[in-house]
């Protein structure tokens, strides 16, 4: 079975739910990158995933199959 590489954009309130869902399905998904524009938020996240402050950089520097957009609804543009 193919495993998909996942990135998460936004590490706020809903972030942990997405991480849990990905980890519960490790046979299907690899969390390889996370992105938030707040460096203090990123430094407090315990994850093996690469951390980025800019989502464009994350997309260019990783082999992501899809992203989870976990920013507040007003930023989903």
Image (tube, grey):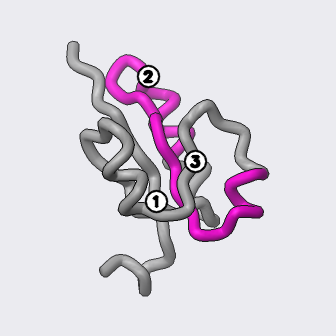
The reply to whether callout 2 and callout 3 are in contact (CB within 8 Å) is: no
Residue 23 versus residue 39: which sits nearer the camera? Answer: 39
Q: Residue at x 59, y 60 (%)?
A: 11
Q: Which residue is mark 3?
A: 51
CA gap, disc 1 and disc 2? 19 Å
Q: Which residue is mark 1?
A: 9
Q: Residue at x 36, y 40 (%)?
A: 62
Quadrant of the snapshot with the C terminus: bottom left
CA gap, disc 1 and disc 3? 10 Å
Instruction: Name which quarter of the figure residue 38 lies in.
Output: bottom right
Instruction: Name which quarter of the figure residue 53 lies in.
Output: bottom right
Q: Earlier in the sequence, mark 1 or mark 2?
A: 1
Which stretch did the figure color magenta? 19-43
Q: Which residue is mark 2?
A: 26
User: What is the total number of numbered labels drawn onto the structure image?
Assistant: 3
Q: x, y (%) of residue 31?
A: 46, 35
Q: Is residue 39 left or right of residue 75?
A: right
Residue 37 versus residue 57: which sits nearer the camera? Answer: 57
Q: Residue at x 37, y 17 (%)?
A: 27
Q: x, y (%) of residue 46?
A: 72, 39
Q: x, y (%) of residue 36?
A: 57, 63
As drawn, 10 above or below 18: below
Q: Is residue 47 magenta?
A: no
Quadrant of the snapshot with the N terminus: top left
The reply to whether callout 1 and callout 3 are in contact (CB within 8 Å) is: no
Marks 1, 3: nearer the viewer: 3
Mark 2, Cα crowd under 10 Å, few <14 / some 14-19 / many 20+, is few
Q: Is residue 39 magenta?
A: yes
Q: Residue at x 43, y 86 (%)?
A: 74
Q: Earlier in the sequence, mark 2 or mark 3?
A: 2
């Amino acid at each position: 079975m193919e495993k998909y590489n996942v990135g998460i954009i936004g590490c706020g309130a809903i972030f942990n739910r997405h991480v849990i869902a990905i980890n519960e399905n490790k046979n299907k998904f690899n969390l390889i990158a996370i992105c938030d524009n707040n460096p203090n938020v990123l430094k407090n996240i315990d994850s093996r995933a690469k951390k980025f402050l800019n989502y464009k950089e994350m997309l260019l520097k990783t082999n992501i199959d899809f992203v989870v957009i976990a920013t507040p609804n007003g930023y989903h543009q």
